[in-house]
Structures are given as C-alpha cells and as structure tokens.
Amino acid sequence: MNKLVYMLFGLLMGPLSSFCQEKTLTADELFVKARTVAFDQKNYAEAIKISKQALQQAPDYTDIRIFLGRLYTWSDQTDSARSVFEQLHRSHVQDEDFYLAYASFVYWNDQPAQAIELIDQGLSFHPTSQDLLLLKAKVAYSNNAYASAEQSVNQLLQLNPKHAEARALAKNIQEYTAKNAIGLNYNFVHFDKQFDHDWHIVALSYKRATPLGSVIFRTNYANKFAENGVQFEVEAYPRLSKMFYLYVAGGYSNNVGIFPKYRTGVSLYANLPHSFEGEIGYRQLYFTDNIWMYTASIGKYYQNFWFNLKTYLTPSQQNISQSYAGTVRYYTKGANDYLGFIIGTGLSPEENRNNLLEISNYKLKTFKVGAEYNFSINRTNLFSISSTYYNQEFRLGEKGNQIDVTLGYIKTF
C-alpha cells in the first residue's frame, strides 16, 4: 500500500517539479534557451514563446526584445515584428543590433529609403559598425544608388580590408559607379623558337555603364607573323538579378589568321552565398572552321584574397583539349588595387594567342605561369602591368618558350 502511495505521489509531483524548475530559470537563461531553440532547432514559434516568458521577468531587457523582433521577422509575422521594432524606436534604443535588425526588416519589406534612414541613425551612434556599413552598401546597391554603395563599402574596407563579403560586393559595384571609361592596352609577345617575329597587340576600348549593365566597345590592332590585322569587338554585362548577370560578346575581323573572322561568347555568372561566385558558358572562334569551347569557373573571396579556378574544354573528333588555370589575387586597397598570380595549362580563347588554336591539329601541351599588378591613382586612373611565361609544345615533341608583357591604362569619368 505504501509503495502505491509513493508512486501516485511521484506521478503528481513530477510535472509540478518540472514546472517549478522551468519557472526558476532566469531571464538570461531563458534568452539562451530561446536562441538555442531558434538557431539549432529552427523552431521559431517555441523561441517566441520562451522569449515572451523571459520578458515577463525582465520587461526592459533590450536584447531579448530585439531578438523577439527578429523571430517575428523570420516567421513572416510582419505586423508583430513592426510593433516590436517601433516600440523600441520610441524608447530611443541606441543598440547597434537594434538598428541592424530594424533596418533589415524594413529593407526586406521593400522600404529601402526607410532602411537607409535607420542605418544612418545607427551609424551616428556607431560610426565604425561594419555590419551597418555592409547593410547600407547592400541596400544602396539594390536600389541602384551605386555612388552611395561604393562609399559605404570602401569605408568598410578601410576599417577591415579582410572583409570578404565587402570585397565581393565592391567588385560588383565598380561596374556601375563610373559612367564612362577609356582604356588603352599594349601587349608584347616574344618567342624563342616557334616564330621569328615578335607580336605586338594594341587595344583601344570605351566602356559605358547603363542601367542594365556595362557595354564595352573595343578595337584591336595586331602585328603577328610580320603582318597587320584589325579586330572589332563588343562586350556587354547585362544584370539579370542581384545574384545573376551575363557576359555576352561578339567580334569580327577581316584579317583571318591574325584574328578569327568571328568570335562569340556567352557566360552566366552567379554571385553565390559565402562570397563564392560561379560561371558557366561557351566561347566560339571561326577561322576557316568553327572552334567551340565550353568554360566553367568557381571563385571565392577570403579576407584580402580572391581565388579562382577556370577550365576550357574544346571537343574535337580525336580528343577533348583541356585548359586549366588557377588565379590568386591579393587586394591591397579597393576593388582595383591588387597583386595577382596565375598558373595553368593549355590554350585559352581569352588570350591574344587564340589564333594558335587554329593552327594546332593535335593536343598541344602548354604550361604557363604569370603575375600581374593593378593599382589606382585618385580612383579614376587605373594602371596594370602583367607578365606571363609559356612553355609551349608547337610541334609534336618540340617545345619553345614565350614571354608576354602587357601594360594597361584606364581612365574613368
């Protein structure tokens, strides 16, 4: 009988004991529990319930109130989230996280002007907030306010040059900040065995930024094999969305052999999460027959660095020619100031040596290694210098060396 009484007593007191233990949790402990439930279990409804319990104990606990607003935002409870944030705003809360959460909420609800206003208020209290500067750059960029976006991202990179997401965003913004750009490039190529004459290539380009993306017109003059040739090219970078943009290109020359008669190219680029970017596309060259190449690449920003792996695959009846290249850039300041290194194998249609693709009737073995240095002066004067060494198989079993040197200048206005 006594055992039965104890069992009944235990069954009755067990839930009561658990309830009492739950009630004895402090507001801090409930806050930690709510965050665990939200982030680890993705159970936002339960996290909201726990956050409300914590606020019953500590109604003025600002961090929990901000977190509750975020939970409502993630749960698509727009009215509840707005009510929480507006109440905090009326209370003159100055926390950095509050302005970040509130501005993100209104931005995600298609109110970019109010988001910028809130971010600026937050920056008045926290002028070196990297999160607020990054959010301001994103909001301005999505609203086509490219000058403001560039200013914010550059300010962020001055505070933290290793901020990978800001570095990736800076690259996208620079395509829209300068309405016009004129460029001049000179490329010198020396062969020790393959050809008797050095090559000289000069390119003059004009770039125009449009609401849809940049357009570049380019004229190339070349002296190859002791003969002259001219090529005309146009390239465009239409923006499809915040994530995707295209590369579309075409070219024509009446000097076949010096240049391909026609060339076309299309690539789809994606700005991926975690500062990754990807590309997939094709290139086509027509000399006396079409040469089709398919390309793919993956890039990653990490602190001051940009890493990229790229391949070109060229199918033929005998085999598939392959080109691989790995590139590393170390950014010293903004988007146009970096030191780069490249190593790779095979021929690429992007190089001034692409006419060698036409004269090769077997799978050429090529090794290349090079370096480049880009720097800007007063933001509107961009200079570049690069050099690449090639060890090229130009006849079966016979190799030669080649040195490329390129000098470039771009004036933006």
Image (spheres, grey):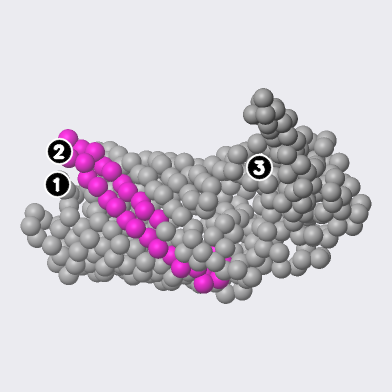
- Residue 143: x percent and y percent? 71, 47
Q: Which residue is mark 1?
A: 362
Please, what is the three-letter code of the amino acid marked with disc 1?
A: Tyr
Residue corresponding to mark 3: 38
Q: In the drawing, does residue 124 fall left or right of residue 280?
A: right
Does residue 132 appear left or right of residue 246 in this picture? right
| Residue on which the image places disc 2 | 318
Residue found farthest to the bottom: 377
Disc with the residue nearer the chain's start (2 vs 3): 3
Q: Earlier in the sequence, mark 3 or mark 1?
A: 3
Question: Quick one: label 2, few (<14), some, or many (20+) residues within 10 Å?
Answer: few
Label 3 vs label 1, nearer the camera: 3
Nearest the viewer among 328 and 254 is: 328
Specify the segment rendered in magenta. Answer: 308-337
Image vertical order of residue 241 relative to residue 380, above or below: above
Residue under the point 37% across and 66% down: 341
Question: Label 2 to label 1, Cα distance in Å?
Answer: 8 Å
Q: Name the outermost residue toward the right.
A: 90
Mark pair 3, 1: CA separation? 59 Å
Q: Are marks 2 and 1 in contact (CB under 8 Å)?
A: yes
Residue at the extreme left: 397
Picture coordinates of residue 245 (x, y %)?
Answer: 53, 43
SS class, disc 1: loop
Q: The residue tagged with tag 2: helix, strand or loop?
A: loop
Amino acid on which the number 2 mark rests in the picture:
Gln
